[in-house]
Image: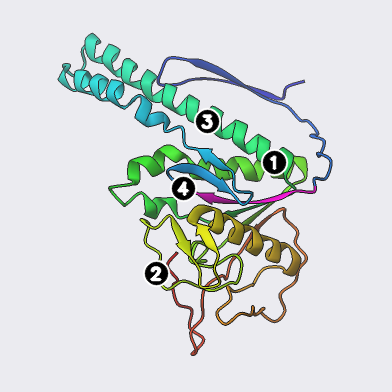
Amino acid sequence: MPSQVTVSRNARGQYHVSILVEDTIPELEPADRVVGLDAGITSLYTLSTGEKITNPRHERRDRARLAKAQRVLARKEKGSRNRAKARLKVAKIFGRIADRRRDHLHKLSTRLVRENQVIAIEDLSVRNMVKNRSLSRAISDAGWSEFRSMLEYKADWYGRRVVVIDRFYPSSKTCSVCGVLASTMPLTVREWACRCGTVHDRDVNAAKNILAVGLTVTACGDGVRPPRTGWCSWRSGSSPERTSRTERYGSARPVASNGVPVRALR
């Protein structure tokens, strides 16, 4: 029996009923696959397997319609019925965009959780990234934060593991074959050749590095630093035992000779 029923009405005039019940969700059978995810704009996510998830760009599909509806709303007199009708039209367009985005993210997150035992992702600072005026609209439309939340609670439901690595780890600049760190890697560079002879797709290489670091965290526990001279160091006293399925790769920052952490640009 439901313990609580909540009826709500959104800006589009739609009514929703939320029913609170207690239920036990059975965990999925253990999977033998693991995956690393690299977030992007052209491709919404790039998997360490080489697969690229196309970015639907839901907001761009309705951008012209939304702009027209907002212009009409701006010309209406405040407090009038026509303004209320125009506001409702704008709300419906925004709601349509949000519904399509949420549906796509739900399907993708459910697929990844069902197929993989361990999912490694980056800890992105979306709040700071949207300050870039050239990319803010595309970043907001991608829904990276919402997708991460979906992955985490679904992994907790079904007995999977989500490992979050530090945002400062140079996943794009590090060769996934030999571990050499490139000096510079501007966003315009989509493919690059390492001195070991390997030609990398920027996003696929980053996803592979994210997966490798995530697996290191699951095996060794928190505290693994990125390699500087071909080796990794562990903090003394770090324990590989974890109590939560969602783990944070909390100290993946290069350290200078004096022991002070320095920021590494991706």
User: CA gap, disc 3 to disc 4?
Assistant: 17 Å
Mark 2 — residue?
Answer: 184
User: CA gap, disc 2 to disc 4?
Assistant: 19 Å
Q: Which SS class for mark 3?
A: helix
- Work out whether residue 122 can be spotted: no
* Mark 3 vs mark 4: in front: 4
In the image, farthest residue toward the top: 81
* Residue drawn at point x = 35 percent, y = 56 percent: 188
* Residue drawn at point x = 32 percent, y = 20 percent: 90
Instruction: Give the mark nearer the N terminus: 3 vs 1.
Output: 3
Mark 1 — residue?
Answer: 113
Given residues 48 and 243, the one toward you in this image is 48
Magenta-highlighted residues: 32-40
Q: Mark 3 touching mark 4, by CB under 8 A?
A: no
Instruction: Give the mark nearer the N terminus: 1 vs 2.
Output: 1
Label 4 packing within 10 angstroms: few (<14), some (14-19), many (20+)? some
Label 3 packing within 10 angstroms: few (<14), some (14-19), many (20+)? some
Q: Which SS class for mark 2?
A: loop
